[in-house]
Each structure stands twice: as C-alpha cells, then as structure tokens.
Image: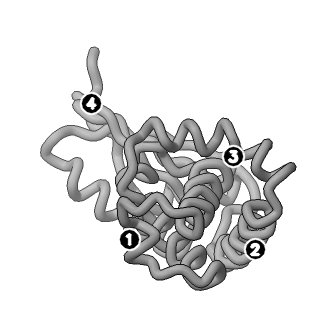
Amino acid sequence: MKQTEEFNEILNITSRLLKVNKRELISKDRSMHLAIPRAVAAVVGMKDAMIKKDIVAKSINRHRTATYHYLKKHNDFFKWHAPYRNGYIKVLKEYKKIDENKKQFIDKHEFDIFIQKLKINNSIRPDIIIDLSSNDYKHTFLSDCFSFTEHMKKINKNLEGYKYNLTYKTYEG
C-alpha cells in the first residue's frame, strides 16, 4: 500500500471516530474542533505508520513545518490535553486494527523466499535503486530506466495486501 493511500485511510478513520467532516479536516480552517483531529491524524501517520512528513503535510493541506510542530508538541498534548489524548488513543487503536489485517512477514527467511519468487533480476548497469522494506526486513533492487516501471508494477502487484514501504532513488556511481 502506498503511503498516500495509507494516510488517506488514517484521515478516514480520524474523521469517522472524531466526528469531523473529512473535507473540513483537510481545509485551511484553523478552528479548535478541526485542529485537534488534524494533529492526531498527522502524528498517527508520521509516528506510527512511518509516513513521510511531506506526504502528511500535502494531504492535510499544511506546510511541511507544521508536521514538525505536531511531532514536537505530541508528548505535551498527550500528557496535558485530554481531548487530544482521547482522540489519539481512539484513532491509533482503530488504525492498529487495520494494520493487523495486513499480511506481514514472520521472519527473514520467509521474506527472502518471497523476494526470490518475484524473479526480478538486478540490472547489470543500474540507474535506479529500489528499496523495499517490510517490518524489519529490507531488500534493494537495482534497476535501469528501461525496466524500472515493470519492476515497480511487479513489486506492487505481488505485495498487494502486505504492509510494506517502497522507495526509489537514482543511482549515482
């Protein structure tokens, strides 16, 4: 599942549990009844789902620096602000239920066998590095610009329903 889709699920959970319209949640409105759910969704997304700050900021229609503020203030809000604490616990519990429904690899051996079954050969002259991580297990694929799209489609298709994170960067050197 892509990070944007996963954060969209977190926004849906937040709007449903905290009884806020999702359209208002991602609006520019700064009123308190929206600020708390927005902060809760952002922190669950970044801290617990490991979603990039840029994706969270774009999804909630805020500047990236606001996400740093949410993370910095999380401990204080959780300790002293009951509506924030209660909302965070509700959303996190519901998110973890969804998280538990996703398939996960039990050990490194199972992960390695799965990678072998993908039958993706590393390119001789790689241009792009594809990093796949699931739980604590990581694998790097070396791809070229001609087979990159095919590799990404194959990886995403085979990992459908699994909890994973897929990133790529250009290979320099």
The answer to whether 2 is drawn above or below residue 93 in the figure is above
Say what amino acid the circle numbered 3 marks: Asp
Identity of the residue drawn at 51% across and 71% down: 11
Q: Residue 90 carries which label?
A: 2
Q: Mark 4 points at which residue?
A: 170
Circle 2 or circle 1, nearest the eye: 2
2 and 3 marks in contact (CB < 8 Å): no
4 and 1 marks in contact (CB < 8 Å): no
Side of 147 relative to 122 (left or right) = left
Q: Could you say which quadrant of the image residue 167 lies in? A: top left
Q: Name the residue under label 1.
A: 157
Q: Name the residue under label 3.
A: 136
Identity of the residue drawn at 34% across and 46% down: 121
Distance Cα–Cα, label 4 vs label 1: 22 Å
- Whichever of callouts 2 and 1 sits on the residue coming sooner in the sequence is 2
Identity of the residue drawn at 52% across and 43% down: 67
* Crowd around label 4: few <14 · some 14–19 · many ≥20 (10 Å): some
- Between 98 and 133, the residue placed more toward the observer is 98
Q: Is residue 113 visible?
A: no
- Whichever of callouts 2 and 4 sits on the residue coming sooner in the sequence is 2
Circle 2 or circle 4, nearest the eye: 2
| Circle 4: element type | strand
| Circle 1: element type | helix
Distance Cα–Cα, label 1 vs label 3: 21 Å
2 and 4 marks in contact (CB < 8 Å): no
